[in-house]
Image: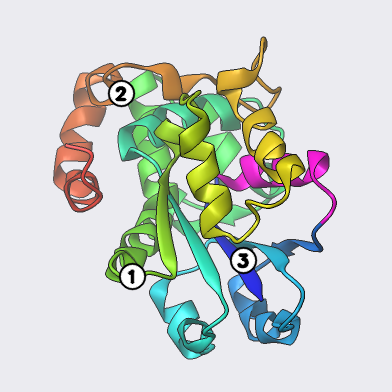
Amino acid sequence: MINCFLLFHKCGNSYIRNVHRVYTETPFINSVLPSEAYKIIEHDKSETIVNLRCRNFSDETIENNGLSDIKSARFLIFTRNPASFILSAAKYHLRGGEQWAVKKPNPILGNKTLTQALREATSLDEQQIVIMKQFDYLYKKQVSLLKYIDNPRFLRVRCEDIFTTTEESYFSSIANFLRLSDRPSFLHSLKAASPAFKKELPRHSTGSFKTENPYLALGNTARGYYDSHWKEYARVLDYL
């Protein structure tokens, strides 16, 4: 039996890793990239649950590797308000803490690296537009997973909820879906990894999830770009 956490950069990625820093009873595969998705079926053991952190998957990745045909599999789909993501990613990558963002040029950004493009931007608006150009592909993938919403083996988790909710029933429903409700330590880890239960935010967090209306927090020029290029993501993901 396998549990696949379908997550994205700045969208459940660090949260699930932190869950399994606390919870160690169930085997955990820390990172599965789309190019490695064919390996997932190897972990489908009838008696043992294996948790897998699946990074930046699309519906194409799932279908091409036959993952939706694995009857014992459960999938958590993480989504995040696109405007909140933009605010967070701009702040986060200005820090220069991710080596790929510091070193890997992107043709979409004029062959600049993401961190370079952000630091050379002359306004907050420009920085936010840089983020939208860099990560447009990521939201295309996130949106593609909505085709599975009505499938009982898939469950959507909004980052806004899992980062702010303190109700026991919310986390219990996730544990139950993943067939781990009989393990109190897993329920504890779901809560312990959430900012809602922390006195201080984790170092990687920017706190942007707390912004009441992230769309209005975008700069005026960035908001115009968002309306033309990203607003449809928000509509499809039901964040409008």
Which quadrant holds residue 31?
bottom right
Question: Would residue 87 be seen by someone viewing this image from the given angle?
Answer: yes
Q: Which residue is mark 1?
A: 148
Check the picture and name the quadrant holding the C terminus. top left
Q: Determine the residue positioned at 45% across, 38% down.
A: 159
* SS class, disc 3: strand
Amino acid at circle 2 = Pro
User: Does 28 sit above or below residue 208?
Assistant: below
Query: In front: mark 2 or mark 1?
Result: 1
Q: Which residue is mark 2?
A: 214
Relative placement, left or right, of 68 versus 18 is: left
Rounded to the nearest angstrom, the CA distance separating label 3 from label 2 is: 31 Å
Q: Determine the residue positioned at 74% across, 80% down.
A: 43
User: Does 34 sit above or below residue 6?
Assistant: below
Image position, residue 153 (x, y; %): 44, 70
Neighbor class of circle 2 (other Cα within 10 Å; few <14, some 14-19, many 20+) is: some
Q: Nearer the viewer, residue 3 or 12?
A: 3
Q: Which residue is mark 3?
A: 3
Image position, residue 49 (x, y; %): 72, 69
Query: In front: mark 3 or mark 2?
Result: 3
Colour mode of the rendering? rainbow
Question: Would residue 120 be seen by someone viewing this image from the given angle?
Answer: no
* SS class, disc 2: helix
Magenta stretch bounds? 10-25
Q: Does 24 appear in magenta?
A: yes
Which quadrant holds residue 121?
top left
Dot placed on the residue nearer the N-terminal end, 2 or 1: 1
Neighbor class of circle 1 (other Cα within 10 Å; few <14, some 14-19, many 20+) is: some
Neighbor class of circle 3 (other Cα within 10 Å; few <14, some 14-19, many 20+) is: many
